[in-house]
Amino acid sequence: MAQPTSRSELIEYCKRQLGAPVLEINVADEQCGDVIDDALQYFYERHYDGVLQTYLKYKVTQDDIDRGTASVKAGSSNTLGITTTSTEATIVGAGVTFNFYENSNYIQMDPAIIGINKIFRYDGSQTTTSNMFSVKYQMFLNDIYSYGSMELLTYNMTKTYLSDLDFMLNTEKQIRFNQRMDRLYLDVDFNSLTENDFLIIDCYRLVDPNDYTRVYNDHFLKKYATALLKRQWGQNLMKFQGVKLPGGIELNGRQIYDDAINDLTVIREQMSNTYEIPPLDLIG
């Protein structure tokens, strides 16, 4: 099928590009599966169509709060929420042991999440809330009491001033995330969290090909998977270099392998120049 919609169809497509069924592609099914996995991983990590910026809701549980607020107990090696590591070092000939404690202030994330930008504020701000005693309410009550007599410039300046106050008085929540750990660390006071509240997470998520089958028909993915399969085919045939087949035909796995390496070099260069989002400049 020229437009594959599944792993098996993509594997068959790649084999046809290499000469099947006219030629026998000497690659095991397990190797084909590895090739597709490697191609998808490269596609996710480099291609701008491999991920989607999305917003996820996470419901806070009491276990999260207990884990993030657990305190270190002296002499306890199995304290709830605390990961204890001990590092031994020798200083000036004297043996010194340093004990480091890390609070388990994290929430478990879906393995499909590969990057997190931020979490939105979950605590109420006295600057921007609309209750009677907030700055926002008082300013609008005294200065903008009638929309008919209000100028847009005045309204804009008032909103900008409120935003500046909110920025100065309410800091952004500090987070740490590594996709290999699947943990979102929240460097906040977990006592400020409330059970059953929701955290809104601004993140990047993989485009699952099982849900969106058009991923398997991506032009770059098909070319890259074919080149990887060709390289694997060449690696297999190099084991039989110089072996004569009936009719005098000789296998040349080295040539197939070298051609595949050249193809991969060209495709990866195309990825960097065409499909990969360039890194943003860091100023300041």
Image (cartoon, helix red, strand yellow):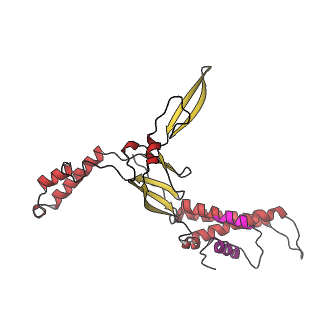
Q: Residue 279, how many percent across, how many down?
A: 48, 55
Residue 56 is drawn in which quadrant? bottom left
Residue 263 is drawn in which quadrant? bottom right
Horizontally, residue 269 falls left or right of residue 250, namely left
- Please name the residue shown 51% across and 35% down the image: 101
Horizontally, residue 267 falls left or right of residue 160, namely right
Quadrant in the picture for the N terminus: bottom right
Residue projecting furthest to the top: 93
**Could you say which is closer to the camera, residue 2 or residue 114?**
114
**Could you say which is closer to the camera, residue 67 or residue 13?**
67
Can you say whether 163 is above or below 71 in the image? below
**Could you say which is closer to the camera, residue 9 or residue 263?**
9
Q: How many numbered dots are placed on residues in this image? A: 0
Q: Residue 152, how many percent across, how many down?
A: 17, 61
Q: Residue 251, how many percent across, how many down?
A: 83, 69
Is 27 magenta? The answer is yes
Magenta segment: 7-36
Horizontally, residue 202 falls left or right of residue 152, namely right
- Please name the residue shown 46% across and 35% down the image: 71
- Please name the residue shown 46% across and 54% down the image: 116
Quadrant in the picture for the C terminus: top left
Query: Overall secondary structure of the magenta stretch?
Result: helix
Horizontally, residue 97 falls left or right of residue 71, namely right
Q: Is residue 262 visible?
A: no
- Please name the residue shown 52% across and 36% down the image: 79
Can you say whether 94 is above or below 254 in the image? above
Is 248 magenta? The answer is no
**Could you say which is closer to the camera, residue 78 or residue 271?**
78
Q: Is residue 163 visible?
A: yes
Q: Residue 45, how many percent across, how many down?
A: 55, 59
